[in-house]
Image (cartoon, coloured by chain):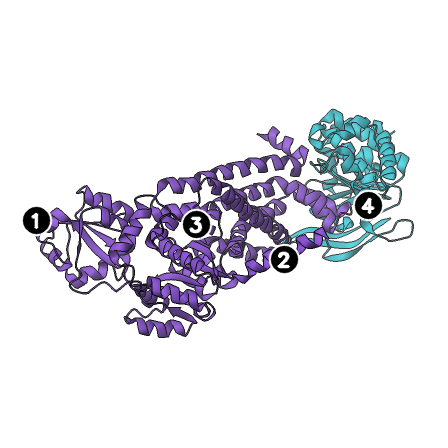
Amino acid sequence: MVGGAVLVVLLAAGATRAERPALRVGSKSFTESYILAEIVAQIIDETGEARAERRLGLGGTGLTWGALAAGAIDIYPEYSGTIAQAILKEPTLTSLDAMRAGLGARGVIVSAPLGFANTYALAVRRDDSARLGLRAISDLARHPGLRAAFDAGFLERADGWPGLQRHYGLRFADVRTMEHALTYPALAAGRVDVIDVFSTDGQLARLDLVLLADDGHFFPDYTAVLLARREVAAQYPQTWAALERRLGARIDNATMSRLNALADLEHRSFAEAAATFLGRSNAQTPRRRGGEIATLTLEHLQLVAVSLTAAIVLGLPLGILAARRRRVAQAELMGVGVIQTIPALALLSFMIPLFGIGQVPALVALSLYALLPIVRTTHAGISTLDPRLIEMTTVLGLRGWRRLAWIELPLASVTIMAGIKTAAVVTVGTATLAAFIGGGGYGTLIVTGLALNDVRTILAGAIPAAVMALVIHAAFELLDRVVVPRALRSAEAAAR
Amino acid sequence: MIALRHVTKRFGDRVALDDISLTVEPGRTHVLLGSSGSGKSTILRIVLGLLRPDGGDVSIDTDGAAGLPTRQIGYVVQEGALYPHLTAARNVMLPARAAGWTAERQAARLDALATLMELEPDLLRHFPHQLSGGQQQRVSLMRALMLDPPILLLDEPLGALDPITRANLQAQLVRIFGELRKTVVVVTHDVREAFVLGSVITLLSHGRIVQQGTLADLAQRPADPFVSEFLGAQAPPLAMTRDLRR
């Protein structure tokens, strides 16, 4: 009876949860995107049709758009210039209606503009602006003695420095590349005179800088909008209406800049910054730290343990097969080698169309990465065994699995374990990249820290990851005592 | 009985065996004598089925039944080829384990072989690297005898041992071959060892048989100047072995 009652309660609880389906909110991994996504998530929760599931801090446009297109997230903030150039790949497109048509064909809808544009701009110190008469970018052409510092991306992009220089006929005494967050202090300290900025950077509100007008209309427009899957508006009409009403033309450049400053400079959480905009004094959305380390450790350990296990289960037979057949070995080692040369972020982005975002694609990518050292050492360990010892197995009547399990694997165990240890330690490090596709783990802190340019947050993720690598290495050294036959260990010790 | 008829074997361009015909009678010890590269080890590997001859044929007949060759043949090589991760006992029992013997039967056979080889039972718990060269070879011979095969092939079994150990083991081998009445083929480059161990000797050079016969045949009626030359190079021990044989 009691059991039945409990069951009913549990079912009811499950049902209430099921009544509010999840809307998955994504963001890219920079402050503004995090804050906008938080605002969206909080509005979704307030409206009550659905509950927000946060998939924040995904890697760049490719990963985030890929996640939306694959249906792994439902909504995320984007910019018109990015839509035209990176998503639709029609750089000449300028009207939002044309973009709506292009995205509509892919089942994606576009909200009304949020009210600000995060475009590239050039900034100078206020005293220079007054002294040299710098009001617009064209004024810079008269002062070739100035020194500029640009972010690496700006320096290379066609819509960055190369195009700008041609468009305005600019020349500077010195143009250097510098990490974006560091250009502000360099400008403030008078070490450089001109820097590239995003027009909503938090630092603009704090430092006394002048943005030069783009009087030649060079920079493309980066008006902020929300992109959502068509079903969102159809299934959650109140939510979509609330987002349009409360965000459409409501965030101007100064407001966004202030919100960015809250997170970047005053070290408030993204949720708090979002709550400030929504007019709530204290955000009840929990912000991570302290207690979260335990959760992240568990997530990270899970990523490493599962992917390493999969790599061993897959890599050992592959390595054995390669040791048996020389032809197969060539193709196989080349195959796993090629996987290794794919940059981790690119491999992760390939996973999105196949597995969406979250832990699963991260696990698949990590397993593939861990494969090479395991296949390599298994192949090398078995194929370099003393041929006289292997020949003797035939004479003694040891065939098939017996030869493998009794002779070859034990004799190759020292080498194979070395490969597994390498894979384990490397996986702990690579697993931090899982955060870029919402896979969780220590990388979450590193990605957030990078967005905030907050070294302490980065270290809060990086140090535990390093510690975990050491602990896992030590654990595997202990495992050697179980896996590697005693005589081989002492023989190895004797050889030392 | 082991019979090779017109066996040839090439490794690339090199002719390793050229028209080899020889017969090993049951219960006899036959020595293949020759310097390195003469093809003697290749003959053993062909008999074992590890190599396939390019021409000719090989037949192995034990008690009239030509059966599974590997279960019928024990094999010992120079330096033993013991598995370093297994104790001496585990090495010896390996073929029986693969053949599915019960633990009791394996243990009983192990004891019997240790007695035969005069090996202290304590040593069987050691790993190969903890044993001397002579002990390793005796363990290796025990492993070859584990399934009691009618045929034993020994490839330079004493080649890596010091002279004293070597002499002791030679004497032990002569005794054991006499007791067990197995068909034995021993490969060696050592003339003295050949005369101590073998009743029939086949002298090989560059993949060909130069002469076949007893000690007396080779010494007194050399078929070829090479025979006298090969024996003469090791003349002093030859004189000694005459006495040993008597």
Whether residue A33 sits left or right of residue A351 in the image: it is: left
Report, in whole angstroms, how far the alpha carbon at label 4 lies from the one at label 3: 78 Å
The numbered disc on residue A11 is 2
Measure the C-alpha gap from mark 2 to mark 1. 73 Å
Q: Crowding near pointer 3: few (<14 within 10 Å), some, many (20+)?
A: few
Mark 2 / mark 1, whichever is N-terminal: 2
Of mark 1 and mark 3, the one earlier in the sequence is 1
Q: In this view, does A217 lie to the left or right of B25?
A: left
Which residue does the image show at 36% across and 56% down from the upper left? Answer: A36
Determine which of the numbered discs, if any, sits on residue A131 in the image.
1
SS at circle 2: helix
Question: B161 or A14, which is in the foreground?
Answer: A14
Near mark 2 (Cα within 10 A), the count class, few <14, some 14-19 or many ≥20, is: few
Q: Mark 3 belongs to which subunit?
A: A
Which chain, by letter, is cyan? Answer: B
Are the residues under marks 2 and 1 on the same chain?
A: yes
Badge 2: chain ID: A
Q: Circle 4 is placed at which residue position?
A: B73
Picture residue at 37% right of the left edge, 61% below the top:
A77
Residue A202 visible in this rendered orientation of the protein = yes
Report if the CB atoms under discs 2 and 1 are less than 8 Å apart: no
User: Which mark is nearer the camera, 1 or 4?
Assistant: 1
Q: Residue at point 45% right, 55% down?
A: A54
